[in-house]
Image (cartoon, rainbow, N blue to C red):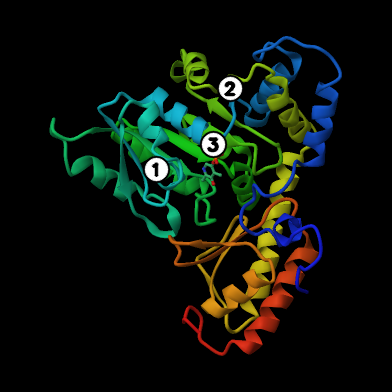
């Protein structure tokens, strides 16, 4: 099925495994935007939609958090980290962390030079031992002082930190006087994968600030910065404004959250995305030329395949990334990925694999 007809393949949603942000807005979010468009309301967040979105997030976490909405994840992470650090501090993160690999130095920029210290760890996760080692190896005045641990939940490798993992990391943070930041661009996928309550993997295990992803979960634009520690939120509104992150027509950022949260789509969307990845992974495992990599728990599948097979799939219009960290190809599923999408890519892969005789990862 060569995508020869209009619109071009790149715009056909079924062909998008590049990212979960290639999906449109979730219908619940879209409907809420329409409702928010009906009246004039106060600007800069002093509107009923924003109040309601904050209340719903507080209900979700069962915690009286301070909440701010910004346009994207880079801003959320960078400003949250800046609020936790002085310029002479260091932020410990995984070497695959989005704040290191995909934010163009924004965390360092907005914190006026706070250094990211990169740690490795299996499955894209930090370990308490790694954190302790990073703190203990240097304690002199010539080295930036570790202040924050930043973890990604779900991780860049589609794994998740369990409650036990988080408790151990939190304990290491307490022992070394470190604050704990969570990049939750795919937080809902982690909740869905673990089958836990949001509080169990945040404030109950010592997370100080969560950057709660909206975009990949089904809103059109925006992430929420959720402070579980009040003093860290002090003057945060000024940071947002100065960074160009205060929306004047705030309701258009916040109404979609109301839509997602009120009907529970935040969770069902994540469940759909995770289930799509599970189905895709299962299918890939039946194709001998393809080797599934890692230990997927969330909505991305990593595979190694002959380069000719990857090229063949791309030739038929399928979009996916080569993901350096895993040494393979990343197929990212979203709430909008359908069984038909998955069956079609698998069928193409099977067909192309017959013409490609080489072992996984070989140049054939
Ligand atoms: C998508 C993503 C973000 C947000 O990226 P923006 O493009 O800045 O919105 C943050 N962290 C992770 C792990 C992501 O995958």
| Residue 276 falls left or right of residue 61 | right
Q: Is 16 in front, or is 337?
A: 16
Q: CA distance from mark 2 to mark 1?
A: 24 Å
Judging by the rendered image, the residue that carries numbered circle 2 is 67
Residue 159 x/y as whole percent:
52, 55
Q: CA distance from mark 3 to mark 1?
A: 23 Å
Crowd around label 3: few <14 · some 14–19 · many ≥20 (10 Å): many
Residue at position x 50%, y 57% in the image? 157
Q: Report helix, strand or loop for mark 3.
A: helix
| Residue 310 location, quadrant | bottom right
| Residue 288 location, quadrant | bottom right
Q: Report helix, strand or loop for mark 1.
A: helix
Residue at position x 70%, y 59% in the image? 275
Sequence-wise first label, 3 or 1: 3
Judging by the rendered image, the residue that carries numbered circle 1 is 169
Sequence-wise first label, 3 or 2: 2
Residue 145 x/y as whole percent:
23, 32
Q: Report whether the residue tagged 2 is closer than 8 Å to ligand 1.
A: no
Residue at position x 75%, y 35% in the image? 260
Residue 296 x/y as whole percent:
56, 61
Depicted 362 relative to depicted 342: above or below: below
Residue 32 seen by the camera: yes
Q: Report whether the residue tagged 3 is closer than 8 Å to ligand 1.
A: yes
Judging by the rendered image, the residue that carries numbered circle 3 is 73
Q: CA distance from mark 3 to mark 2?
A: 14 Å
Depicted 131 relative to depicted 62: above or below: below
| Residue 39 location, quadrant | top right
The quadrant of the image that shows the N terminus is: bottom right
Q: Is 209 in front, or is 290?
A: 290
């Amino acid at each position: 099925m060569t995508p020869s007809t209009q619109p071009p393949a790149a715009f056909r949603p079924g062909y998008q495994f590049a990212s979960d942000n290639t999906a449109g807005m979730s219908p619940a979010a879209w409907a809420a935007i329409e409702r928010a468009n009906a009246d004039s309301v106060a600007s800069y967040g002093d509107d009923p939609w924003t109040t309601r979105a904050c209340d719903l997030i507080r209900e979700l976490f069962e915690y009286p958090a301070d909440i701010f909405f910004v346009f994207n994840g880079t801003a959320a992470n960078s400003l949250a980290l800046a609020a936790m650090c002085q310029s002479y501090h260091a932020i410990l993160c995984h070497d695959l962390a989005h704040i290191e690999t995909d934010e163009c130095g924004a965390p360092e920029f907005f914190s006026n030079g706070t250094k990211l210290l990169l740690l490795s760890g299996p499955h894209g996760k930090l370990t308490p031992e790694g954190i302790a080692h990073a703190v203990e190896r240097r304690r002199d005045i010539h080295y930036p002082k570790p202040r924050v641990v930043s973890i990604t939940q779900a991780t860049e490798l589609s794994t998740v930190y369990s409650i036990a993992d988080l408790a151990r990391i939190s304990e290491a943070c307490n022992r070394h006087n470190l604050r704990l930041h969570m990049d939750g661009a795919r937080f809902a996928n982690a909740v869905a994968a673990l089958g836990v309550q949001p509080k169990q993997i945040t404030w109950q295990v010592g997370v100080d600030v969560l950057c709660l992803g909206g975009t990949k979960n089904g809103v059109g634009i925006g992430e929420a910065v959720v402070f579980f520690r009040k003093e860290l939120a002090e003057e945060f509104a000024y940071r947002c404004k100065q960074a160009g992150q205060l929306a004047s027509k705030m309701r258009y950022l916040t109404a979609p959250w109301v839509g997602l949260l009120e009907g529970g789509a935040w969770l069902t969307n994540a469940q759909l995305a995770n289930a799509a990845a599970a189905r895709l992974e299962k299918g890939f495992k039946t194709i001998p030329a393809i080797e599934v990599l890692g230990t997927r728990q969330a909505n991305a599948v990593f595979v190694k395949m002959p380069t000719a097979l990857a090229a063949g799939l791309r030739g038929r219009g399928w979009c996916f990334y080569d993901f350096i960290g895993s040494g393979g190809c990343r197929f990212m599923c979203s709430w909008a990925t359908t069984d038909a999408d998955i069956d079609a890519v698998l069928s193409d892969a099977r067909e192309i694999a017959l013409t490609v005789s080489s072992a996984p990862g070989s140049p054939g």
